[in-house]
Amino acid sequence: MQTTARRALLALAFFFSAGLAACSGGGGSANPAVIGGGGGATPTPTAVATPTPTATPLANVPSASKTVAPSSASTISLTTSANASFGITVPAGGVNTTGTVTLTEVKQSALPAPLSRTRRPSFTGGAGNTYVYAFSIILGSGMSLTQAVQLQASAFANVAAGTVLDVAKSSGSTWVDVGTVTANANGSFSSNVPSTALPGVNGAGIYLVYAPAAGTNTAVANFGIALIADDGSLYPTNGVQIVHLYDTNGNLLTTPTQSVVPFTGSDLDGAALTPDGAHGIVVDGSNQLGFFHGAQTGSPAPDTTPLLDISAYGSDGDAVAISPNGDEAVASLDNSNGNLLVVSGILAGNPKPAALITGSVDTDSLVESADGRVMLARQSGGAAIDVWNVTPLSAPTAAPIGGTATIAHSYTKAATLTGPQSTGEDGRNGLAISPVDSSRALVAGVDTGANPVVNLLTGLPSSAAVSSAATLRAPASRIPVPKAEVTRKPRYVLPGGIGVIPSCVAISPDGTFAVVGTNSGLVLVNGVNTGTLAQVGSALQPGGANNSTIRTVAFTLDQKYVVTIIPSAAQSGKGTLLVIPVTGSGSSLAFGAVAAQLDGVAYPYNDQLLMH
């Protein structure tokens, strides 16, 4: 080991022994846990006494060092104190200069803060967090990481396959989540793709790999996949299409790969995923709910649970939302009285109708915030938007319907707002809630003068209001004018005028700007976080002037790309998935040239593309 690295490790050891007594008390008094379970089951945390931090002799701490250069990738591995394997890979170009990188194990007894002290925008750590592994990275003099390193591990005896674990970095007396890893077979785990919210292991410091307490994880893992409910366009093999956008190193594939999670339903109109990707749900037009799992493994599959018939509660399944822990969902069933159906018991493999909640108008589109606190329901073909306050109950209670079913949330209608008129139906239908601030949302549609607009909602849920609006400038489109306006000469709609129809919207992962899809292409809108919306730059017609009808859109979670689908000129009901870079920020935001595409994908007729 280099002398500099040894001194740094000694400094860490003295820091552990001298400074941790204060860190382990106060607000972080809940006991950490050791990983339990195994054998393919979900880990069950087992409480242990909070250890008394002491200096750990360097001879007993597994450590490894390696000279790393910018010119090529380098892997540094060590055998852990439990005889497992753990390593980091620094990608080519991942350091600014040649030098020594040292990887050292940090034992649970030497953690600089309790596991209960994590910090997220929407989650406060709790007693059920489970220690898996901790390590430090020391960089040589003048070195810095210019890209996130990848984590690889194997032979961790009690890490259950399919579990999404969080990676946190020490920050004083707390932990800050910076990434996620997915557990695979044989006790192995590996890094997921970095995202804007979780940038990964990208600097020197002390890091912790842990399993969040069951049902508490709202950190959205980035698996680099797009999920598309087929809306009937994959017949006879209907289902949710899974498109992999990145390779295992997080590099964009110029030709993404695809697979399908099959369902017997023929008109999948909406889908939703939990933040960790472990549980998904779809709804079809024949009033059936289907359930799937394993998106975080890259190979999702249908649950063994039979499709749930909910035809007794509505006429047409249109949209669905799911709670962050995956056990409760809400379905929109196209009821004239505005009823929405709550379904519970999903995780136990026994989902049942649990409650009917009554809105203001016939709604057929839904979105729920990533933190599970806000839900929006939109009127079909109208301007009404119901705002729901979703609150966890202190304990599950008997459900109003469903016999033995229970319900774990209360759903209170906080407001009914008047937004732009809906131009579509089903799925999200032009609704989007900020991924980092559930008090903000966007609604795309047309105003009373039939102009294309996007409205900003703020103060969600309790003091909800429409606080800003932007009229969109889109390219001229060859859209037929209404019969009352027909003249002897052909007429073409002017940019930003009647006939440009917004149908979908997505907010950037950092919550600052948005992309709106119209029948004339894509439009960038800035100011989601500031409260004043404004279109930025020119609209993009990714399929040319005659083939840029956009009905669904999403951001990759690293915020580098917008993903959308345009109709196929050769295959009815099929389309081409496009991955389009977004560069700049603020008033300099702009679209780049198409970076990847995949032909022959499902072309949904509503806004239901999911990114994970």
Image (cartoon, rainbow, N blue to C red):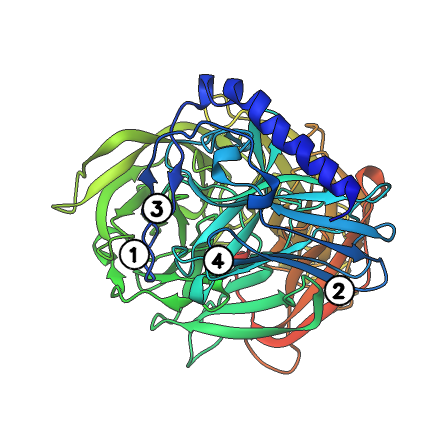
Kindly report which numbered mark, 2 or 4, lies closer to the viewer in this rendering.
Answer: 4
Identify whether 184 is placed above or below 36. Answer: below
- Amino acid type of the residue that numbered disc 2 sits on in the rendered structure: Pro
Kindly report which numbered mark, 3 or 4, lies closer to the viewer in this rendering.
Answer: 4
Would you say residue 284 is visible in this rendering?
no
Name the residue nearer the viewer: 123 or 603. Answer: 123
Left or right of 348 in this view: 321: right
The alpha-carbon separation of the residues under discs 1 and 4 comes to 58 Å
Query: Dividing the picture into quarters, in which one does residue 453 lie?
Result: top right
Task: Give the numbered dot on residue 83.
Answer: 4
The residue singled out by tag 3 in the image is: 330
Q: Earlier in the sequence, mark 2 or mark 4?
A: 4
The alpha-carbon separation of the residues under discs 1 and 3 comes to 15 Å
Query: Dividing the picture into quarters, in which one does residue 488 lie?
Result: bottom right
- Amino acid type of the residue that numbered disc 3 sits on in the rendered structure: Val
The alpha-carbon separation of the residues under discs 2 and 1 comes to 36 Å
- Amino acid type of the residue that numbered disc 1 sits on in the rendered structure: Ser
Asked if labels 2 and 3 touch by Cβ distance under 8 angstroms, the answer is: no
The alpha-carbon separation of the residues under discs 3 and 4 comes to 46 Å
Q: Earlier in the sequence, mark 2 or mark 1?
A: 1
Identify whether 107 is placed above or below 89. Answer: above
Left or right of 65 in this view: 293: left
Kindly report which numbered mark, 1 or 4, lies closer to the viewer in this rendering.
Answer: 4
The residue singled out by tag 2 in the image is: 542
The residue singled out by tag 1 in the image is: 315
Q: Secondary structure at mark 1?
A: loop
